[in-house]
Amino acid sequence: MVKASMKIAVEGCCHGELDKIYETIEYLEKKESIKVDLLLCCGDFQAVRNEGDLKCMAVPAKYRTMQTFYKYYSGEKKAPILTIFIGGNHEASNHLQELPYGGWVAPNIYYLGYAGVVRYKGIRIGGLSGIYKSHDYRKGHHEFPPYNPETLRSVYHIRNMEVFKLKQIQMPIDIFMSHDWPRRIYHYGNTEDLLRKKKFLRSEVETNTLGSPAAEELLAHLQPSYWFSAHLHVKFAAVMQHPPKGNAAPRVTKFLSLDKCLPYREFLQIVDIPDRSSSSEGLEYDPEWFAVLKATNSLQVTTPQRWNPPENNGLHERWDFRASEADMMQVMEDLSGELGIPDNFSRTVPPYDPGHPQPHAPQSYNTNPQTTELCAKLGLTDIYCKVRQRGNDAGRSQSATGEDEDESLDEPSEYPTDTSGLSSSFNPDEITIEDEWEEEEEEGAKADLPSDTHTPSRMVLPEPKSTISPSVLMDLPPPSHSTPIAPPTQPEGEQEGRCSDEEAAARILKRSSGDAGSGNTTPRIKRRNQLIYQTTDDDECEG
């Protein structure tokens, strides 16, 4: 008897291309006679509602385009598949800040919040939004629009408060999402193939500085069955076998990172997850997670001052915030026994109107009724509202109120190996592992250098912790389900990043920019945003 499974589509960096992503899934469903149950997007979602939101997104001005999310926000369209996403480092941050504990950004499109755990048909899904930066990691969520060049970027940096909350989770997690990769995960897959695709990552891989130490810590603690990421704009699969906990059998995490939504890029994959019994067919709150939120609510910090989590060192009255059965029963009582997430989406700003553009629209601040309602039920603090109450000066805290203070007076970073805390005189996130504005140009320049300038010549990797093939563990269909190959006239440069024959078993869907194959079986997907496709450099426009 074949066990039933749920088909989950996983997408890398969305970059606002919702129309194209949904069209691709629809094409795949028709071609393979399947039904996708759920779409997971691993960051850079870009839930931009109007021109004001564009100014709250950390991207170069020439890439600030509306894309297609506003159609789903306005009601012009509705997402055909339940979509769950986390934030990355290119987001309409003022919009996402309205929903610190998660919520609907449009009908059928759900944001997990700064961190979150939900349930869907018995599958437990968690996520952590943003990217790791050591110099902001121990601060509170103090940012507030209108952002300046510094807070425009610090607003999407992960905070240790969210990691501390997630480390209180005890019950198994099926799927976890992060935008940047857990540090060292690259040692558990085909590292050399990764470095052939992304040569500039070699130094970080060799020194174990590539990726997020915070995500690495969560991976070791949560040990989910699947971990999905994006950010580096490359497909990479890995299998990590964790050390056993007590007498339990060792758990295995199947890691997959995907590319961004562009032609001939490996940006989408269907994963089969075994069905579970569930109390609901819809999206549900998670009682354990809500119990953790309630227990840690008094620890919330909304200033740029450093915060260290409580420890069992005699200095704190409480350091263990794990949820008890009684805590979870209290959550059920708070929710009147109803775990189903209500369809309570509401618009908080006017949507973009192509017929009446508003290029001078300001960055907006709004409280969100979804957050207000949830906080009232659970007794939580709306931290975005709390920052507003502190006033604009506190909400836009900058170097004069802490950023320029002598770092030597602070306690050392929890992750001292991170060296990315650079001067705020330029964008610290515009580095090769986070943004690819000039990646192809840089790689081309390196190719012209004499061979003796390429360093290092070799790298030492640990022995693999598992001999199981990632493609086998992903339970993927055969390669015949892939989009047809591009015509022979396709420029050679656009063929980069295609799977080898061995990798084809992993069936990563690649969307063609035009007709492919024979007949009319493959749709022509219209390029709605010509700016992205103009030049080779533009192809690598965002991180």
Image (cartoon, rainbow, N blue to C red):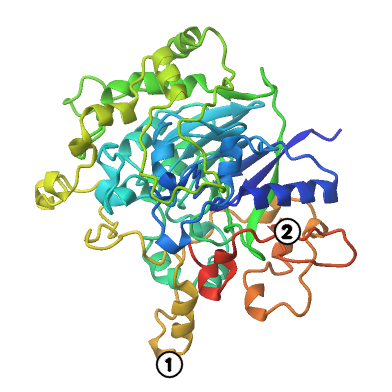
Residue 389 horizontal/vertical position (percent): 24, 26
Spot the residue most to the bottom: 450
At 23% from the left and 48% from the top, the residue drawn is 413
Residue indicated by mark 2: 525
State the residue at coordinates (84%, 67%).
Answer: 517
**Real-space Cα distance between discs 2 and 1?**
42 Å
**Which residue carries the number 1 mark?**
450
The quadrant in which the N terminus is found is: top right
Q: Is residue 543 visible?
A: no
**320 horizontally vs 19: left or right:** left
Q: Is residue 266 visible?
A: yes
Q: Position of residue 475 (x, y in %)?
A: 72, 47
Q: Position of residue 241 (x, y in %)?
A: 54, 47
Give the residue at the far right of this rendering: 519
Dividing the picture into quadrants, the one containing residue 505 is bottom right
Kind of residue at badge 2: Ile
* Mark toward the viewer: 2 or 1: 2
